[in-house]
Amino acid sequence: MKILYLSTNNMGRSIIAESITRKYAHMGIKAASGGSKPGDDIHVVAHRVLKDNHFSSVNLVRKSWNTFDTWGADIVITLCNKVLKEKCPTYVGKSVHVHWGMDDPSTKFGNMEDNFNKVFSVLNERIEKMLSIDITKLEKEDLRAHLKKAIL
């Protein structure tokens, strides 16, 4: 099962989600992330938050969402509202797509570390809920409903 996380810059939220999901590789889950306008590098605070929470940032690099045209994602999860307003690649329509909209932690007021830690906590909880059952056995509509429940 391939899960792709998309955001605009692929520097924070989607990178964190990719790293969290990688810990489920033993369940046959493959994770990746991309962005419509990928930034220059992964946000330094995203790296620090992953490290502080004992998650790997090895081989995490920002990528264009066009990189995944032939990857064959089973699930596409968009994480920012801006990306929904853009013309998404056609593969999004072929996958089970849900939106887990979250504010960009790098542009929110307040302590940057706290902002990224909050994003990490929310994503970790949602991904745990998503993968608490064997999603490979669900039909598309049941899978979509299950993914939507993960944000409640």
Image: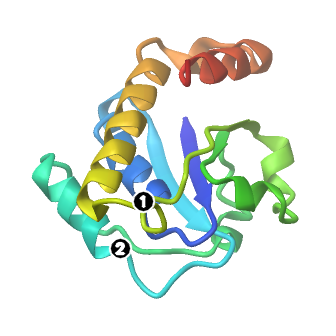
Most extreme residue toward the bottom, as rendered? 40
Using residue 93 as the reference point, say whether residue 98 is left or right of it. left
| Mark 2 vs 1: CB contact within 8 A | yes
Residue type at mark 2 is: His
Relative height, residue 68 to residue 92 (above, below): below
Q: Which residue is mark 1?
A: 15
Q: Which quadrant of the structure image shows residue 88?
A: bottom right
Point 40% across, 74% down: residue: 61
Residue 75 seen? yes
Q: Earlier in the sequence, mark 2 or mark 1?
A: 1
Residue 58 seen? no
Image quadrant in which the C terminus is located: top right
Point 20% across, 50% down: residue: 55
Estimate how packed mark 2 is, as few (under 14), some (14 to 19) or many (20 or more) residues with alpha carbons within 10 Å: some
Residue type at mark 1 is: Ile
Task: State the image coordinates of residue 103 (x, y, percent, origin top left).
Answer: 55, 52
Secondary structure type for disc 1: helix
Task: State the image coordinates of residue 63 (x, y, percent, origin top left).
Answer: 54, 74
Task: State the image coordinates of residue 85 (x, y, percent, origin top left).
Answer: 84, 60
Which label belongs to residue 43?
Answer: 2
Q: How many marks?
A: 2
Most extreme residue toward the front, as rendered? 110
Task: State the image coordinates of residue 84 (x, y, percent, origin top left).
Answer: 79, 54
Q: Which quadrant of the structure image shows residue 28?
A: top left
Estimate how packed mark 1 is, as few (under 14), some (14 to 19) or many (20 or more) residues with alpha carbons within 10 Å: many
Label 2, label 1: how far apart the Cα atoms are: 9 Å
Using residue 99 as the reference point, say whether residue 119 is left or right of it. left
